[in-house]
Structure formats: C-alpha cells, structure tokens
Image: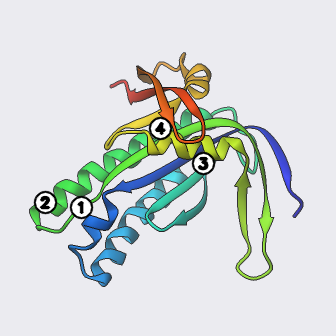
Amino acid sequence: MNARDFNLVSILFTDFKSFTQTAEKMSPQSLVEEINVCFKAFDLISEKYKIEKIKTIGDSYMAAGGIPKPDKDALKNIVLAGLEMQRFMEKRQDENRETEIPAFEMRLGIHAGPIVAGIVGVKKFQYDVWGDTVNTASRIESNGMVGKVNISESLYHLIKNEDCFSFEYRGNIQAKGKGELKMYFVEAVS
C-alpha cells in the first residue's frame, strides 16, 4: 500500500509513569502479564470507539482516530476512549492494591492534525503513521499528568462544543523540541 496523506487525524499516546521502578518490583512473567492485561483492555476500548491501534512500544500504546477511513465522530471518540482507558487504569490500581501487586499509573495525551500513513517493511510489516502531528501528540502525552487526559489546543478547538466534555486550561507548557504549547485537561461530563 502506498503512503497516503490525511488532513485530520487524532493521535493518542499512553505511557506508564515510573515504569522502570515499578517493573523492578515484579517478576518478568508478572510484568508481561500486567502489561498484557492493560493493553488488551486498551485494544477493546479502541475497538469500541472505532479508533485504530497503531502499535505498542515497550510500555507505550499508540492509537489513531480518523484512519484508515475518515469519520466525523473520530475526534470525540478518541477522547472518550482516552477517558475510558484512564478509568480502566484507576480500577486496575484498586484491584492490584487489594492483592498487593504493583500497579502502573498512566499519562495520556492526544493531538490532532495532518499525518502520512502507510504500510512499511517486508517482514512483520505494519501500518504506521508519520508527521509532526505524531511528534506533537507524544509531547502532549509526556507533559500530561497521571490519571488525566491531556489534549492540545488544536484538538480543544475542534471538540470544545461537545456537550459530553469539560475542559481545564493548563496554560503554556514547555514541550521538548516544540517550545511552548497550550494544553488542556479534558473530563467527561456526567
């Protein structure tokens, strides 16, 4: 498949905070099992909200909304998916506390913009995405806070009229390689 340009795609990144320190308290087997429990849940959430899992990289999960087929609800759905992923992690922490198993805390960030997508490789080929939007989404995630869904200003402007969300403006945040970026926390309105 040839590379294809998309004008507006949302990119979601997750990352477990203090992963190395938490992993050191676990056996290799229980570490892999815990990551698998989390990523399986994320896969099901992604499927539910019709967002595309792109890949996992170590303890990071990456998904995209609006590809391979553009979808008018993709921006709202990827934020709903992010909120549900954070709820899953909170529930998992509670379960693990009861059984005294180390639990991960997670940052999650989402940005929207243009990307290029396509299949790369010959062996173990995979569908992947590239572009500044992907890099910015990664910075939005790394500047987030545990338990929160952190979004970019551009995504905020695209979804600010959705009745199901409330927003908290965070101001200008210094992002590595990006300068200052305006960011928002988003929550579901109950």
Check disc 3 and report the residue beneath it.
Answer: 50
Kindly give the residue lying farthest to the top in the view shown: 161
Check disc 4 and report the residue beneath it.
Answer: 80
Verify CB contact (< 8 Å) between mark 1 and mark 3.
Answer: no
Q: Which numbered disc covers residue 103? A: 1
Q: Amino acid at mark 4?
A: Leu
| Foreground pick, 133 / 35 | 133
Q: Amino acid at mark 1?
A: Ala
Kindly report which numbered mark, 3 or 2, lies closer to the viewer in this rendering.
Answer: 2
Kindly give the residue lying farthest to the right in the view shown: 2
Q: Residue at x 60, y 48 (%)?
A: 50
Is tag 3's residue or tag 4's residue first in the polypeptide sequence?
Answer: 3
Kindly report which numbered mark, 4 or 2, lies closer to the viewer in this rendering.
Answer: 2
Is tag 2's residue or tag 1's residue first in the polypeptide sequence?
Answer: 2
Q: CA distance from mark 1 to mark 3?
A: 27 Å
Verify CB contact (< 8 Å) between mark 1 and mark 4.
Answer: no
Q: Amino acid at mark 3?
A: Lys
Is tag 1's residue or tag 3's residue first in the polypeptide sequence?
Answer: 3
Q: Which numbered disc covers residue 97? A: 2
Is tag 4's residue or tag 2's residue first in the polypeptide sequence?
Answer: 4
Q: Amino acid at mark 2?
A: Arg
Query: In the displayed structure, does residue 86 sit left or right of residue 55?
Result: left
| Foreground pick, 44 / 102 | 102
Location of residue 157 in the rendering, given as x and y in whole percent from the top left corner: 59, 19
Circle 3 crowding by C-alpha within 10 Å: few under 14, some 14–19, many from 20: some
Q: Residue at x 36, y 77 (%)?
A: 32
Please tell me whether residue 181 is drawn above or below residue 38 in the rendered image.
above
| Foreground pick, 95 / 172 | 172
